[in-house]
Image: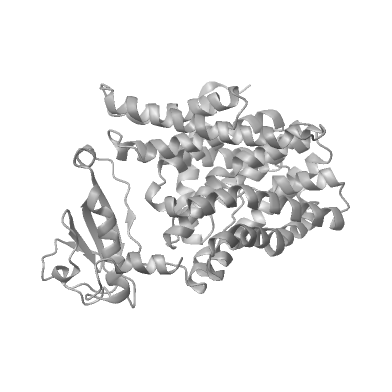
Amino acid sequence: MASLEVVLGVVAAVVLLGVLAVRASVRLGLPSLLIYLAIGILLGESVLGIQFSNAPLTESLGLGALVFILTEGGLTTRWETVRPALGLGIVLSTVAVVVSIAVVGVALHLLLDLGWREAFLWGAVLSSTDAAAVFSVLRGVRVRPRLAGALELESGMNDAPVVIAVILLASGESFTWVTPLLVVYELIAGAVIGALLGFGGAWALRRAALPATGLYPLAAIAVCVLAYSAGQLAHASGLLATYVAALVLGNADLPHRGGVRSFAEGLGSLAQIGLFVLLGLYASPPRLLHAVVPAVIVGVVLLLAARPLSVVVSALPFRVPWREQAFLSWAGLRGAVPIVLALIALVEGAPSAQALVDVVFMLVVVLTVVQGPTLPWMAQILRVARPAEPRELSVDAAPLDELSADLLQVRVPVGSQLRGVYLSELRLPRGATVSLVVRDEEAFTPTAETRLRERDQLLVVTTAEARRAAEERIRAVDQRGRLARWHGGRERERGRG
């Protein structure tokens, strides 16, 4: 067994490579998740020779990493963004899962000659969108708030029903009339446990006088992990409890909220790096070559049939425009979660589970290459992108928390009606002001007579109460110019349904 210094050195080197991979992925145009997988494969049996084939350990570590990824997703998700898409997000994470399992199951039974239960198990494993992939890719694509909110909610919540479906199908036990009731109980109980711990944790953290500011992020993360444990011990969905608890905490008035979110983002990134490197280490490249053809078949079924049909069925009650439906279909990103789900099936002893692991691994690589880099392009083609969408910066500063203030970054895109507008004409609400302008890579403090140009970047400081009105005003001027009405942005969003 390797000594402690060797293990720590290897782990530190892998983490540093993973951090540097983020910058390299931006330059190369590849998702960083693929680079993490590649690091794991290089460390594995076929290259550097590290032998690792412990499926139960990989499954357990994978679920542990998923808990931290969901925690990061919930803590950094703004309730104001996802609230308009709450209904659509819930339906996408439940009804869409059922439709996807059915479509993939029937297709694989006919195309790959799998048994019915086996085919539906494959469909369940492949029905989950990946929280890590969605959070890392989608937040770099400026789309309409309802779309972003629906996709974030779906990726955060659909792991829970999918894990239940995989365990039920892999166990081999017979289904009875009680089975649907148990599934409903696990989901509802998980959500309730998460909400209770989230509100309770927020109440306690607001009243705690901890001796160091760094203890607040640790306490918030601990509450979310406790929600997972409590959910599992109550035979409910621990993953859903984790996400709901994190969502409640992330939108509560916590002390040092900026520090909590920054710490959660760092921990989530560490979990992503560790999870994908671990899965790459577990993979066997010689076996993966035999999985290419089935992976392509499954990928075609997912992209052209299962995902679009599940989105259409889910979006029907909400009258979602076809362009947004098309984007939702293309943005159903797969990542590490399906691989972890396949490992659950393998540990449960399901038939052909090893083949399922290999096929899912290849499929994740193919879909990540196809979908991830093309998502911004699809948003532009379908005209669902919002280049001037304000976004919150990650700032760790206690005074901002004490003043209940937020920082927004706004980019003035080419063709925006913001071009030529004087700051005095922007008429931001009381409590919001443009504190900095970056133009041609030079920053300066603006005045009321500063005139905006294309490609300018603005730093807007706003109180929490004025934030929404400031965002609506910026959107309205971006779309209609300096004479836009105060609530033009809100009326337009309502007009889109």
Which residue occupies 71% across, 35% down? 344
Residue 271 left/right relative to 285: left
The quarter of the rendered structure image containing the N terminus is top right
Task: Answer with the quarter of the image where residue 295 lies.
Answer: bottom right
Residue 465 point in image, percent of width and height? 24, 49
Residue 419 left/right relative to 171: left
Residue 101 left/right relative to 247: right
Residue 114 drawn above or below residue 370 = above
Which residue occupies 22% across, 75% down? 482
Which residue occupies 70% across, 58% down? 306
Residue 492 drawn above or below residue 405 = below
Residue 242 drawn above or below residue 470 = above
Using the rendered image of the protein, determine whether residue 44 is visible from the camera's viewpoint: no
Residue 469 point in image, percent of width and height? 26, 58
Q: Nearer the viewer, residue 292 or 23?
A: 292
Residue 220 point in image, percent of width and height? 39, 30
Residue 243 drawn above or below residue 328 = above
Using the rendered image of the protein, determine whether residue 169 is visible from the camera's viewpoint: yes
Residue 39 point in image, percent of width and height? 58, 44
Q: Nearer the viewer, residue 462 or 436?
A: 462
